[in-house]
Image: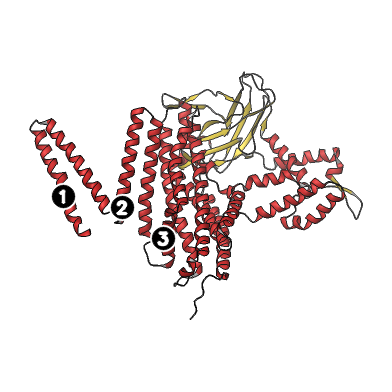
Amino acid sequence: MTRRLPPYLGILAALIVVPGAVAAYLLASGHGGAGWGVITAANVLVSLWLAWGLWVWRHVAWVNLVGRVALLTLAAQLLATAGTAAGATSFVTLVLGAWGMGVAFMLGLALLRLAFAGSHPVLGVARTMFDEAIRQKVGLIFVVILVVLVPLLPVFLNDSRLEYRVSNFLRYSLFVTGLLLSIMTILLCTRSVAREVESKVVFTTLTKPIARWQHLLGKWVGAMALNALLLTVAGVGIYAFTKAIAQQPAQDPLDAVAVQDEILTARIVHTPDEAEPGMLARDIGERLERLRQLEPDFYMTTDPVSGQVRPIPFEQLPENLRVPLQAEVVSDWLSVPPRSSRVYRFSGLTGAAEYGRFVQLRFKPEAKGAAPPDKRMQLWFRANGRDLDFYGMENGQLVSKPMPRFAEDKFAVIRIPVEMIGDDGVLDLEVFNGGRGAPDQPRLAFNPAEGMELLYTVGGFEFNLVKAMFVLWVRLMFVAMLGICAATFLGFPTACLLCGLVFAAAAASGYLAESLDQYGAFANEDMPLWGKIIGVPTAFIAKLGEGEYYDAFKVIIRTIGEVFTAFVPALSEYNPAPMLAEGRAVTTDLIGRSLLWVGGVWTGALALIAAALYHRRELAHVQV
């Protein structure tokens, strides 16, 4: 067959060149109909000849790849043509998106095989790993779901404002990508190791010149190489569809500006500082002194030696007293009384002028009382002693306008010129509640978490997306090693169950910790975890003695939950999806911490455990 390839290519060239020359002569001679007839006939002959060649030489790797790409392209073309004829624009977008991601995956897989073509044992195991993932129906199903689901998401986004559609697509697409690849990785790694042990294939493998740790490392490298390819394909698809959605009609000029300035960007976030250092500590002290007078039983203690009554310092208060007191003071600080003002300081803005003309103030005013009938609040701002104007869009240009009224309990953004920032990088922002002829309105509060933030752009959306996908890849390092480690001592179903439980707890670690806090409280929340574990029997017996059987049960449940979460990495702290969807920069600090803790400490610990367990198993002994 191989010796017949040159004649085949010669005939293919003749079918292209000869009819082309004849058609050109006929068109030049004024025989247009005959010329186009020759071109049509030649296209049919070339297509048939190509199809025959792809079938005959399908056993050749590159020919097989070209054939699959051609078949996928033909199917996509037919579906897209039918969708265009029916006026189904969303369906055409879905088909073209799935086609592009599918072709990118097939080409990337071919490049992966070339990259892992070396003779090193780790490379050989890795190459077998991702080849096995494609041969297995489970792995292939997840690839197809990813390639189809990402292009399908825009069809379900029907938010009225364009900024919400773009933001939600980014949030959901990254969530779906991370979840699908995590599940696929768990199934692939656990199945590959466990089934090789169960089928005794590993007996043959480990009698070759390959160490057991190299065998496991090859499995992990192969899984991570496949994840890198799929994340790249998904990232290209997410970028293309984000740009396509961003070109859709906006609700108003502000909506269009919000997409570019608040989502398709990378911004650094600054939160307000105390304009007067020590102000919050002083307010806490004053409020604590009043509480000591009103409720001495909670805020005062008796010295066991001298018998004198003395105040309990703020740092030594139980958490159930200290945290609400601190939160109340901070909430008062982040609120502005009616017809009054308060100053908030933002520092560290020295480099803001290098990235643009403006910094952005993002805030959400919450009415602590009866809001005006139209739910809009009047606020005024002064930056470093100078009144702020509102910069809005008019005929595609940013122009200065009077400060509008802002919707209550809705996020708003105003631009502050960088020249108003002091040379020391400090901006003192004075916020006025009402006044200047505005109607009476209640106290305005800003949520401590995200109610008032200052942001400025430090990069573009493209590089921010790349960094977000890299953080997802680092998270998958832990997931892949978790699956391999579980499969070294468990069967496939049990290993999958254990990995699913650990992954769910790690991904929802923040929510789980908050739920445990609300489910049951310890007498001293400041006590370290080990101290709580030691004190559990005492607390349990005390609750039983008091007849509070349900509370005794809660002590046990919370202790088990906290012990479990202590041995699970907090993957929720390394989730780039909300940052990308809100136009916040995926910082170098986040990448570094994820590499250190998730990719280094936790993955490394699991690798050591897996190597130790695998080494102790009786898998293959060579007898001489």
Q: Is mark 2 on a helix, strand or loop?
A: helix
Amino acid under label 2?
A: Asn
Left or right of 25? Residue 353 is right
Disc 1 marks which residue? 11
The three-letter amino acid code for the residue at tag 3 is Arg
Q: In this view, does 479 lie above or below 98?
A: below
User: N-terminal of the two: label 2 or label 1?
Assistant: 1
Across and down, in percent, residue 438 comes to 62, 19
Sooner in the amino-acid sequence: mark 3 or mark 2: 2
Residue 292 to residue 62: above or below: above
Residue 487 visible in this rendered orientation of the protein:
yes
Q: Nearer the viewer, residue 371 or 356?
A: 371
Disc 2 target residue:
64
SS at mark 3?
helix
Q: Give the label on residue 321, or none.
A: none
Q: Which of marks 3 and 1 is nearer the N terminus?
A: 1
